[in-house]
């Protein structure tokens, strides 16, 4: 993409309403624009990253054997009355009426709707286990929406639901989700720590939330630093292997990690002093096992192998896709702007032409641009007639991991400059070598 043809309304000044880093940088980088309190339009750059995050979630969910689907944003209130949550959910639920005076609501979550789908089509244990998920817009009427996409009223979320015959099967689904989430976050360049949490309105005894460490996190986190050193890397996971999934669960959750709400001071003392850490954390996902809470209330049953009709065991699993963008920026930025991890960057590489209009510089930039595209990469070529300072500031602000700088002086020596946004280190290379180096970096992801 040529920047001269791209819609990127960057701001030089920080809007007064932006209180945290991610909100400030998303506004300044032209990624979002507020429509009303807690509701945003996603502009091209922001939408591009949102799709990158969504694709990673889809790939990891399907790798784990979960089936994608899509449910409506508007639900009937009758389903929620069946489960007993319509009145209990509170003022965060946006309740509406249609022209026939029927009670409807804008989806805050979809346990009732997926349970209704299940009970209409599944009646035998032979159809289990079953896990389906969607990535869909949700709405919760926060009393004080703030911090941009971190605590908005409208948000983009992956919500998944498992149906199993027994508690043991459902707990395997729980462990399987924990593994798939850890892989998902790692691909996004995040270190997310799973912590036991409160199930709240969802119900059930088993739940873990995933927190990304960042200075602006809403929760204080007490943890064993050894948990941050665990990694999947190229580890192969068989999601059908009950013992392996349970082993990963134990590996990550046996190391101490608690929020300020669940911190047990006596147990933290059991962690060696040199490994004790206290930080802030941002919640980016949560998994729940809630047994037969919804299936009993709504008649979601199957005939078991012995012929008896039993309620199914269920769980739900959420990832805040739009919230993740804010979390990544909070965890990865500097005073110049965003620093995107390679796995989620909107463009793989930026090309800066220091002398737009110079025949040799223009030709070299175009060759770099076409060369990167030919290898399946997506470069952003700053071909504007702007000064070098303005171009560098824009590239730093939007945070592309790699930048190739082209100028007459370097071209006389047959080189361009390849710069890492994260480290600031630069290297002079022939243009063909710069293309090759960028391709190798992304091939290794």
Image (cartoon, rainbow, N blue to C red):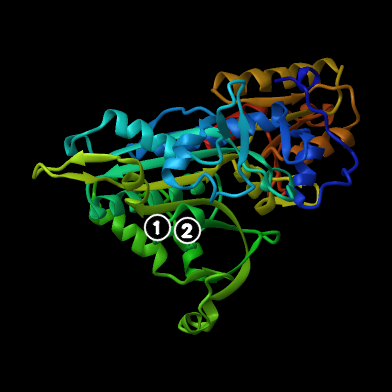
**Residue 199 marker:** 2
Any part of residue 348 in sight: no
Q: Quadrant of residue 116?
A: top left
**Residue 204 marker:** 1
Q: Is residue 168 left or right of residue 193?
A: left
Residue 269 location (% of width, % of height):
50, 84
- Position of the N terminus, as image quadrant, is top right
**Residue 126 marker:** none
Residue at x 84%, y 39% (from the top left corner): 393
Residue 181 location (% of width, % of height):
45, 48
Residue at x 29%, y 58% (from the top left corner): 246
Up-down: is 177 above or below 413? below
Up-down: is 225 above or below 189? below
Q: Do callouts 1 and 2 mark residues in contact (Cβ within 8 Å)?
A: yes
Secondary structure category for the residue under label 2: loop
Residue at x 72%, y 17% (from the top left corner): 366
Task: Calculate the distance from the C-alpha at mark 1 to the C-alpha at mark 2.
Answer: 6 Å
Q: Is residue 425 left or right of residue 297?
A: right
Secondary structure category for the residue under label 1: loop
């Amino acid at each position: 993409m040529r920047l001269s043809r791209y819609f990127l309304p960057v701001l030089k000044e920080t809007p007064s309403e932006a209180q945290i880093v991610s909100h400030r940088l998303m506004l300044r980088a032209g990624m979002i624009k507020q429509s009303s309190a807690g509701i945003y339009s996603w502009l091209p750059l922001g939408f591009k990253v949102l799709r990158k995050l969504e694709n990673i979630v889809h790939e990891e969910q399907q790798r784990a054997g979960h089936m994608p689907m899509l449910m409506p944003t508007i639900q009937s209130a009758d389903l929620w009355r069946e489960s007993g949550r319509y009145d209990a959910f509170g003022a965060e639920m946006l309740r509406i009426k249609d022209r026939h005076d029927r009670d409807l609501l804008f989806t805050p979550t979809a346990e009732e709707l997926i349970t209704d789908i299940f009970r209409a089509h599944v009646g035998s244990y032979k159809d289990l286990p079953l896990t389906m998920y969607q990535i869909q817009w949700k709405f919760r009427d926060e009393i004080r929406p703030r911090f941009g996409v971190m605590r908005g009223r409208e948000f983009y979320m992956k919500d998944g639901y498992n149906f199993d015959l027994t508690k043991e099967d459902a707990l395997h689904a729980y462990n399987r989700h924990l593994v798939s989430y850890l892989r998902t976050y790692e691909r996004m360049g995040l270190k997310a720590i799973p912590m036991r949490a409160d199930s709240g309105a969802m119900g059930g005894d088993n739940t873990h939330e995933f927190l990304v460490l960042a200075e602006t996190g809403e929760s204080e986190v007490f943890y064993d630093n050894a948990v941050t050193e665990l990694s999947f890397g190229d580890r192969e996971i068989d999601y059908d292997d009950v013992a392996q999934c349970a082993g990963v669960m134990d590996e990550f959750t046996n190391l101490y990690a608690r929020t300020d709400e669940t911190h047990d001071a006596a147990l933290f003392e059991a962690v060696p002093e040199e490994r004790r850490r206290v930080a802030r954390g941002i919640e980016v996902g949560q998994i729940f096992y809630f047994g037969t809470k919804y299936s009993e209330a709504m008649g979601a049953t199957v005939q078991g192998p012995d012929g008896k009709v039993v309620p199914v065991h269920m769980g739900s699993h959420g990832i805040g896709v739009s919230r993740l963008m804010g979390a990544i920026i909070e965890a990865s930025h500097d005073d110049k702007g965003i620093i995107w991890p390679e796995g989620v960057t909107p463009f793989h590489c930026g090309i800066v032409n220091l002398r737009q209009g110079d025949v040799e510089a223009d030709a070299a930039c175009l060759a770099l641009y076409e060369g990167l595209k030919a290898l399946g990469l997506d470069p952003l070529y700053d071909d504007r007639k702007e000064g070098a300072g303005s171009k560098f500031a824009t590239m730093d602000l939007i945070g592309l991991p790699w930048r190739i700088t082209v100028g007459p002086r370097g071209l006389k020596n047959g080189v361009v400059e390849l710069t890492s946004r994260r480290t600031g280190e630069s290297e002079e290379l022939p243009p063909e070598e710069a293309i090759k180096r960028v391709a190798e970096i992304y091939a290794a992801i």
